Amino acid sequence: MTSPRDRLIVALDVTNVEEAKALIDRLGESVGIYKIGLELLFSGGFALAQELTRQGRSVFIDAKLLDIEATVERATAVIAESGATFLTVHALDRKTIAAAVRGRGDTKLKLLGVTVLTNLSRADLAEHGIDEAPLAVVQRRAMMARDGGFDGVIASGQEARALRERLRQTLIVTPGIRPAGADTQDQTRVVTPQAAIKAGADYLVVGRPITRASDPRKAADAIVEEITAALPQ
């Protein structure tokens, strides 16, 4: 069984490794997994990921890979060697998905398919030439990722319940989490921690509500309490 603490993924969306390390120190043992995204990856974040895995911590590399097959395969292989727990890859086509699976090989890296970013609305999808509601697009891409050998998908809490009905054994990782009453900021499809877990999410990705809080550890502990309350007793 995954503990409530280990279901919380904190996004280290800071500009440099020193800030990230200071934040990790403040959070202590209140967090199960740390997410390193593009902002930090390009300023020493990959070396930090390797350091954290050597310390026995779980790391989520949020690279959102999307490129030609050879590049995706080689990049995935390098990330797998770091000891990371999760890696994101855009689940837009079968070629990209298959390349990531080949790159992962027999390592323990779990591949997560990015379906539709949580800041996108139906109007935004129309700009991409997609005349569908976000849920329909999320479901189609999630099924393709599952069928292609991915371990899980990234999807908003608003789609988690519908996905869980179809994807019984697939991990659902939900960003766009905002505690009740919090500012949604640049997110469009947001839910509270309790709502996401009750809808079927396995892991929650939380950034600014924790990292920009006056007391990050207290904020993280409060979200873990919400996760605990939402889990079946």
Image (cartoon, grey):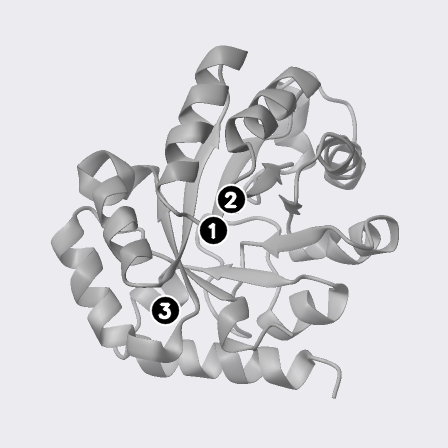
Which numbered disc, 3 or 1, marks the residue that appears first in the sequence? 1
The residue carrying mark 2 is 109
Split into 4 quadrants, where in the image is the C terminus? bottom right
Local secondary structure at mark 2: loop
Residue nearest the viewer, comparing 157 with 166: 166
Local secondary structure at mark 3: helix
Residue nearest the viewer, comparing 99 with 136: 99
Task: Tell whether 147 sits left or right of 219.
Answer: right
Q: Position of residue 155 (x, y in %)?
A: 65, 47
The label nearer to you, 3 versus 1, is 1
The residue carrying mark 3 is 210
Q: Position of residue 44 (x, y in %)?
A: 18, 41
Task: Tell whether 130 sits left or right of 64.
Answer: right
Is residue 94 placed above or below 15 in the rendered structure? above
Residue type beneath disc 1:
Thr
Q: Are marks 2 and 1 in contact (CB under 8 Å)?
A: yes
Q: Position of residue 140 (x, y in %)?
A: 79, 32
Task: Tell whether 132 sits left or right of 88.
Answer: right
Local secondary structure at mark 1: loop
Q: Residues within 10 Å of mark 1 (few under 14, many from 20)?
A: many
Q: Quadrant of residue 216?
A: bottom left
Q: Is residue 68 something that shows in the picture? A: no
Residue type beneath disc 2:
Leu
Q: Quadrant of residue 196?
A: bottom right
Q: Residue at x 75, y 38 (%)?
A: 146
Q: Residue at x 67, y 69 (%)?
A: 197
Q: Residue at x 65, y 27 (%)?
A: 125
- How far apart are labels 2 and 3 at the CA level? 26 Å
Q: Residues within 10 Å of mark 2 (few under 14, many from 20)?
A: many
Which mark identifies residue 85? 1
Is residue 68 placed above or below 61 in the rendered structure? above
Q: Are marks 3 and 1 in contact (CB under 8 Å)?
A: no
